[in-house]
Amino acid sequence: MTRRRLLPRPKTLRARLTLANVAFVALGLLATAAFSVMATYTVLGSEIDHTLRESQRSVSSAPVTTDALRKLCTLADILQDGKDGTDGGLSFAKAFKQDLFVVLDSDGRNSSVCENSGGAGSRIRQDLTRALPEPAALARSGKAVNVRADGTDYRVVVTRLSDGSMIVQGMRYSGLEHAVHKLLVWESAAGLALLGLLAVGSLTAARRRLSPLETMVETASAIAEGDLSRRIATARHGSSEVRELSTALNAMLQQIETALTESERATAQLRHFLADASHELRTPLASVQGYLQLYEKGMLDAGEKDRALHRVSAEALRMSRLVDELLALARLEERPALDFRPVDVCALVRDAAADLAAQQPGRPQTLLLPRDGRAVHALGDEAGLRQVIGNLLSNVRVHTPPDARLVIEVGGDESAVRLRIADSGPGLDPKDAARAFDRFFRADPERAPDTGGAGLGMAIVQAVVQAHHGTVTLDTGPGQGLTVHITLPPAGASPPAAAPVGELAAKDRAMH
C-alpha cells in the first residue's frame, strides 16, 4: 500500500531548490521569533518583578501600620477629589506605581482599609483571597507569583506590616502580553514578507543559474534527432561547475561524433572493399573458368591450348598477387610486431632506382642524396620500407610515360627522416588525389588489365608508413606530376608503440 503525500512533491529542480531555501529560512525565522518572544517576555517580566520588589522593600522598611495606611488612603482620596472632582479610585495604588493595592488582616482576610484607593473592587478582592490561600507564606518568602482576579492576570507580592497585617501589591500582566502579542504579529508579518521575497528571488536565481541545464537538454534532444554537430553553448550565467560540465560534454559529444563518423566510413569502406574484392577476383576467375571449360570440351587446337594455359597462368598469378596484397594489408591492420632497427634509407633508394633502371633504361632519374655520402638512418622495418619505395617506383613505372623524369630525394635531421619521390607525369586531379590511398582505387580503371594492378599499392604504402608512426602526403595536380612526401622517425627515436589502425587513419586523414 503506497503512502499518499499531504502535499505534492515539486517536479522541477528549480521548485525543489526554492522550496528547500524557503523551508530552511522559515525554520530559522521561527527559531529566531521564538527566542525573541521568550527574551522579551523574560525581560519585561523581570522589570515587573523588579518594580514589585522595590515597592515591597520600601513598604517593609517603613514603620507602617494599618491605622497609618487608613489615614494615608483617606488623605489620598481627599487630595484626588479636591483636584479634579473625580473618584480617588487608584490614587494610592498609583502612588506606588502599581495597579493593585489590597490590605489584608493578620489572618489573610480582606480588610476595609484602602478599599477605595487600592484599585481593587469587591470581586477582585474575593478572587484574590481565593488565589492566595497562604499569603503569610508568600510574605515570608518574598516571592512574586501570578494570580488571576476578575479575568485579569496580575503579578503580586505580599508584604507583612509591623502590626501583623499584610499588603498585597500587584501589576497587570496584560501590558506584557499585549507587547509580546504585538511583537509576534510584527515578526510574523515581516517573516512572511521575507519568505515571499526569498521565494521569488530564489526562483529567479535558480531559473537563471539552471538555464544552462535546459540548454544541455535541448542539445541532447537535437543530437538524439540526428544533429550530431550540435554542441552546448557557453553559459553566461552558469557557475564554474556548469561550465566544466559543458566543456566535458562537448568533448564527449565530439568523440561520439568522430566515432560514429569513423564507424560509418569504415562500414562504407568495408562494403566497397567487399564489392571491389569480389569484382577483382570474379574477372580472373571467370577467365580461368572459361578457358578450362573450352579445354575440357576439346574445343581448342594445339596452338590455342598453349595460349589458354598461358592466360590461365597469368590470371592465377594476378589472383595470387591480389591475395598477397590483401594479406599484407590484413597483417598491417592487426598491428604486427615489426622488426624496428636503424635502416639506411639511401641504400634502399639506390637499390630501388637500380631496379627501375633495369626495367626502364630510358627513364631519366635524379637522386638527391647527402653529398658527403653519409647514410641517413631511419628507425623502421627494412622489408616494410623497401616495399614502400618499391610500390611508389612501380606506380611511376606503370602510370607515367617512359621518358618522364623521376627525382628521389633523401634528407633529414634529428627530428625526422624525409623522403621525396617526384615524377613529371600527368598527375591527378584533386578528386582522385583525395582517394589515392583508398583500396582498389585506380585513377584509370580501363588500364587495369594492362597493368595488372588491383589498386592496393598506395593503400599498402599508407599502412606501412602509419605502422612506423610516420606520415605520407601527396602534392599533385593535372599536368603537374605527382610528388609523394614521407616522414619517418630517425634512428635515435624510441620504437613506436602499437596504436589502433582507426586512430592512425583518422590522424592521416586530418593531415590530408
Image (spheres, helix red, strand yellow):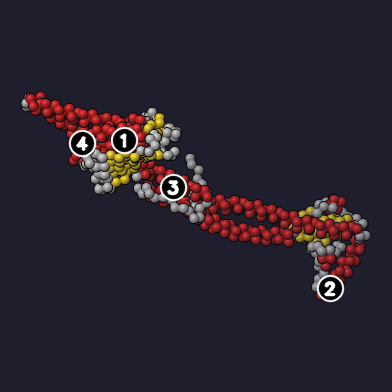
Classify residue 64 by image quadrant. bottom right
Which badge, 2 or 4, is on the more N-terminal residue?
A: 2
Which badge, 1 or 2, is on the more N-terminal residue?
A: 2
Asked whether disc 4 touches disc 1, contact meaning CB atoms under 8 Å apart, the reply is: no
Q: What element carries label 2?
A: helix
Residue at image coords 85%, 69%:
77
Question: What amino acid does circle 2 point to?
Answer: Asp
How far apart in space, not on screen, are marks 3 and 4 (Cα)? 49 Å
Residue at image coords 15%, 29%:
311
Task: Give the numbered dot on residue 301.
Answer: none
Which badge, 3 or 1, is on the more N-terminal residue?
A: 3
Report whether 416 appears left or right of 359.
right
Mark 2, other Cα within 10 Å: few <14 / some 14–19 / many ≥20: some
Identify the residue position indicated by label 2 in the image: 81
Which badge, 3 or 4, is on the more N-terminal residue?
A: 3
User: From the viewer's perspective, is the residue at label 4 or at label 1 nearer?
Assistant: 1
